[in-house]
Amino acid sequence: MFTTVAHYTDPIEAHLARGRLVSEGIDAHLGDEHLAMANWEWRLAVGGVKLRVADCDAERARRVLQAIDAGEYALDADSDEARALQAPDRESWSSRLAWLALMLFAIPLPWRRRARDDRAQRRL
């Protein structure tokens, strides 16, 4: 049998918690996740997304979830892992111009830069 160890109003939070439990070796399943995604206004009425584990793993799963809430798995802002998770800066004047044209005039402009070798091969 399965035991519900947590309820979440946000399905993404539920998936993060489930992922942590799975990485700890605990088989976890989500209940009502699709209902919460499709009918977001019903989330509270059905009790949110339910995180369920086997009865024998329930206590261990609760300890892991308490550790998540306590911040034991959080990354420090100055750590190397946190810096590695930042997205690279890909902004350029052409991407900003394309965004501006799309927002102001509803005209999608291509902003992909092509290499010089690519242009030479296309002419042949």
Image (spheres, rainbow, N blue to C red):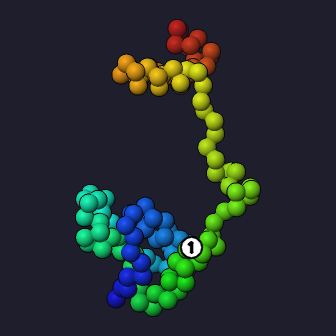
Q: Residue 8, image x and y in percent?
A: 39, 70
Q: Residue 9 versus residue 57: which sits nearer the camera?
A: 9
Q: Is residue 118 left or right of residue 79?
A: left
Query: Image height check: is 43 above or below 58?
Result: above
Q: Residue 80, image x and y in percent?
A: 74, 55
Residue 91: which quarter of the image? top right
Residue 79: which quarter of the image? bottom right
Q: Is residue 54 left or right of residue 60?
A: left
Q: Residue 93, image x and y in percent?
A: 59, 21
Q: Residue 112, image x and y in percent?
A: 53, 23
The residue lying furthest to the top in this view is: 123
Mark 1 lies on residue = 68
Query: Image height check: is 97 above or below 33?
Result: above
Which residue occupies 51% across, 20% down?
Answer: 97
Q: Is residue 75 left or right of residue 42?
A: right
Q: Quadrant of the N terminus?
A: bottom left
Question: Which residue type does callout 1 highlight?
Answer: Ile
Residue 34 in sight here: no
Which residue occupies 61% across, 43% down?
Answer: 87
